[in-house]
């Protein structure tokens, strides 16, 4: 990767019209799903998407939010996995044709078993039981679900029940569910210990995981399947694979497909999108830890220049696909992980991933100088990352600025130096 840095003294709104470019140009007609997205949670970049903000029935992908909240409660010490609950009549809300653990009022069950039943069996009675335990009632828990969705920026989402039952006001999007998957894997990674289980048994009821990709690839460890007639077949899929980067040794990708035609098709489409993204994108360190971004002149202080530095490494996802022809997902070789192109003469060629990427950074300073005294958190700069002159990522540089004002005598000396040029 070759990186060039340009520093521009511009206000932050000067790039407000820029839109991050898709890293992979995939022909949506070749992807057999109504909506889909590929997210790199390390960089936060969307690699490719189609119709990803369309509000659709999420079905049992809803239960990712239930598990996310439950695991947050465990992390906060408000719940314990080994806590044993007594099932209440709330389980009678679940109808005979819904996925369930067949809990009965008065039956005792641990939080751990409820979470396994929720994620692996997609049990609706587990969902309502956890909801009641956490918030006191199902309606109160649904309110919590929507607050959590808002906090995660899930603007296409509204929940009306914890199980994923089809209702007019119960909807989400591929984009939002990928962001939820990002939160689940980063904030409550224990979820993956449930979602990677190939099967789960409870009281002589055996259930095999419906995420078929788990059997195909040991790097896959989640996330959730869902199906209703209204939703079609949905799948949130994730995997983690080694990168060779010291700053980020494992790379996780998240794929969400919604509205596919069958369980087999959702697995096929999601797995192809996953492998394509791993093969033709990569994570790179755009800015190193403590890297100098710019220097700002300081007025009325003995400090002449303030160093604007990155407080942590910044990861950027770049494209390794260098071909003007959009990717035909149907012709992607899912064994060798290569894009195959059929030429006009009928010959088939392989598009090899790039070995080197041309990337440059534009640093836009929000202020041209700093005047002492200063003691506050400041948004000092915006860094825009470009690949092949297309914006692919942006991030802000903030810092807690502490600059003492020079004494009156020191300011007098500085003024005299300015006047007499000595």
Image (tube, rainbow, N blue to C red):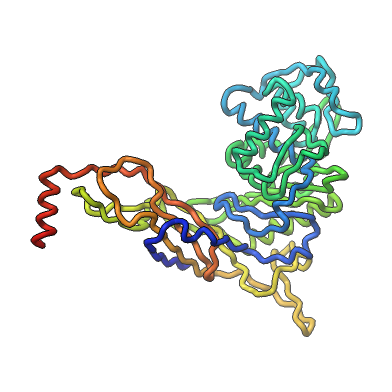
The x and y percentages for residue 397 are 42, 51
Q: Count the labels in the image.
A: 0
Task: State the image quarter where residue 85 is shown.
Answer: top right
Q: Quadrant of the C terminus?
A: bottom left
- Residue drawn at x 62%, y 69% is 321
Q: Position of residue 394 (x, y in %)?
A: 50, 56
Q: Residue furthest right?
A: 96
Residue 278: x and y in percent read 64, 59
Q: Residue furthest top?
A: 106
Residue 119 horizontal side relative to residue 373, left or right:
right
Quadrant hosting residue 210: top right
Q: Is residue 308 visible?
A: yes
Q: Which of the pair 340/228 is nearer the observer?
A: 228
Residue 71 percent coordinates (x, y): 64, 31
Seen at 70% across and 20% down, the residue is 136
143, above or below 266, in the image = above
Q: Residue at x 71, y 68 (%)?
A: 327
**Viewer-nearest residue: 113 or 122:** 122
Q: Is residue 345 left or right of residue 380?
A: right
Residue plotted at (65% across, 44% down): 155
Which image quarter: residue 305? bottom left
**Does residue 219 show up?**
no
Q: Is residue 293 left or right of residue 218?
A: left
């Amino acid at each position: 990767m070759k990186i060039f840095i340009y520093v521009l003294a511009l206000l932050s709104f000067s790039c407000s019209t820029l839109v991050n470019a898709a890293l992979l140009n995939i022909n949506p007609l070749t992807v057999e799903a109504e909506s889909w997205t590929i997210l790199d949670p390390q960089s936060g970049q969307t690699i490719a998407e189609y119709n990803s903000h369309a509000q659709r029935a999420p079905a049992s992908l809803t239960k990712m939010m239930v598990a996310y909240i439950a695991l947050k409660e465990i992390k906060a010490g408000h719940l314990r996995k080994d806590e044993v609950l007594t099932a209440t009549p709330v389980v009678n809300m679940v109808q005979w044709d819904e996925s369930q653990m067949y809990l009965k009022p008065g039956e005792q069950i641990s939080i751990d078993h409820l979470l396994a039943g929720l994620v692996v069996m997609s049990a609706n009675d587990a969902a309502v039981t956890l909801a009641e335990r956490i918030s006191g009632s199902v309606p109160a828990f649904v309110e919590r679900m929507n607050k959590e969705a808002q906090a995660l920026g899930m603007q296409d989402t509204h929940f009306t029940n914890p199980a994923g039952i089809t209702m007019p006001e119960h909807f989400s999007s591929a984009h939002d569910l990928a962001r939820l998957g990002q939160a689940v894997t980063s904030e409550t990674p224990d979820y993956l210990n449930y979602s990677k289980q190939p099967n789960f048994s409870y009281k002589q009821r055996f259930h095999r995981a419906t995420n078929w990709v788990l059997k195909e690839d040991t790097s896959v460890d989640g996330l959730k399947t869902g199906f209703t007639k209204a939703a079609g077949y949905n799948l949130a899929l994730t995997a983690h694979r080694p990168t060779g980067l010291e700053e980020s040794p494992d790379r996780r990708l998240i794929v969400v497909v919604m509205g596919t035609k069958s369980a087999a098709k959702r697995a096929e489409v999601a797995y192809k999108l996953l492998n394509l993204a791993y093969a033709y994108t990569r994570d790179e360190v755009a800015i190193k830890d403590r890297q100098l971004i710019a220097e700002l002149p300081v007025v009325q202080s003995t400090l002449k220049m303030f160093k604007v530095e990155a407080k942590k490494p910044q990861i950027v996802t770049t494209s390794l696909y260098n071909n003007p022809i959009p990717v035909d997902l149907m012709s992607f070789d899912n064994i060798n992980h290569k894009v195959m192109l059929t030429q006009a003469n009928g010959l088939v060629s392989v598009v090899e991933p790039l070995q080197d990427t041309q990337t440059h950074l534009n640093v836009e300073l929000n202020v041209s100088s700093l005047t002492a005294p200063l003691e506050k958190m400041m948004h000092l700069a915006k860094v825009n990352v470009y690949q092949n002159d297309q914006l692919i990522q942006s991030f802000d540089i903030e810092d807690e600025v502490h600059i003492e004002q020079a004494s009156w005598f020191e300011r007098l000396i500085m003024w005299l130096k300015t006047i007499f040029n000595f």
